């Protein structure tokens, strides 16, 4: 638990159990009237069970852990908005098989604030923090000032962000090309009339 907290310093981390309901009191203290909360996570991890237990009602369909795979099952097939007795608003989403960066503006820097802070001391302004001489991030990693797991996650998400941004740019380029083809086609049709 402490390793997780050290990696995401600005996010509350609570351990809970849907079986024993330990930790539920801490979750309930966080829920405020009129505020919206969204349950996100992999299929079968217990999001709907948590919501049912918090509401005290059987709102969302749930099933037991599979005996053959020992994993939760994908049951929720739609989003549901539920207002709890204390006025907190919960949104239950169906499970996700994949999560990616849709808009990385500022998110990477906020999530990895320590790496962002260290990068201000890099020798090169466009440092990728992967192999450059004079990289303050790598230097901090080598002397133990930054965790290697956090650094590896940073590199992975940086690659995902770059991939998404290049894919988005490629899509825009294709869209422009297609629009030009359609425009020229319409001009050609008008000429023939």
Image: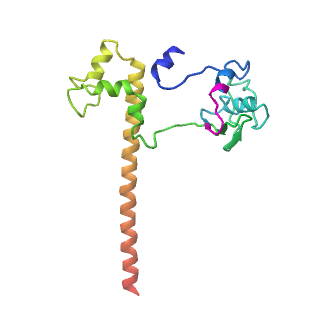
Q: Quadrant of residue 172?
A: bottom left
**Count of numbered badges drawn on the protein:** 0
Question: Quadrant of residue 12 in the image?
Answer: top right
Q: How is the image coloured?
A: rainbow
Q: Position of residue 145 (x, y in %)?
A: 34, 14
Q: Is residue 19 above or below residue 168?
A: above
Q: Quadrant of the C terminus?
A: bottom left
Tell me where residue 91 sits by quadrant: top right
Residue at 73% in and 18% down: 20
Q: Is residue 44 left or right of residue 133?
A: right
Q: Is residue 63 magenta?
A: no
In this view, the residue in front, 107 or 71, is: 107
Q: Nearer the viewer, residue 182 or 37?
A: 37
| Image: 26 above or below 31 | above
Q: Is residue 170 left or right of residue 2?
A: left
- The answer to whether 57 appears left or right of 166 in the picture is right
Q: Over which residues does the magenta segment extend? A: 28-37
**Vertical side of 99 occupied by 3: above or below:** above
What is the quadrant of the N terminus in the image? Answer: top right
At x 69%, y 43%, the residue is 80
Residue 109 on image: x %, y %:
38, 32
Q: Can you give x and y, in whole percent of width and height, for residue 104 in the image?
A: 41, 40
Q: Which residue is at 22% across, 33% downward?
A: 125
Q: Is residue 62 left or right of residue 147?
A: right
């Amino acid at each position: 638990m402490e390793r997780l907290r050290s990696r995401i310093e600005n996010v509350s981390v609570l351990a809970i159990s849907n079986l024993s309901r330990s930790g539920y009191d801490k979750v309930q203290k966080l829920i405020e009237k009129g505020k919206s909360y969204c349950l996100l996570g992999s299929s079968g991890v217990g999001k709907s069970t948590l919501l049912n237990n918090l509401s005290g009602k059987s709102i969302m369909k749930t099933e037991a852990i599979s005996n053959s795979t020992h994993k939760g099952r994908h049951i929720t097939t739609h989003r549901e908005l539920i207002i709890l007795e204390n006025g907190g608003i919960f949104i239950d989403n169906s499970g996700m098989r994949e999560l990616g960066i849709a808009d990385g503006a500022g998110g990477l820097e906020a999530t990895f604030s320590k790496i962002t802070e260290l990068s201000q001391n890099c020798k090169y302004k466009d440092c990728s923090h992967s192999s450059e001489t004079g990289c303050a991030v790598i230097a901090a990693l080598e002397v133990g000032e930054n965790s290697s797991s956090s650094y590896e996650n940073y590199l992975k998400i940086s690659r995902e962000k770059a991939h998404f941004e290049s894919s988005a740019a490629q899509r825009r380029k294709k869209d422009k090309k297609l629009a030009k083809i359609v425009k020229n086609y319409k001009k050609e049709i008008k000429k023939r009339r």
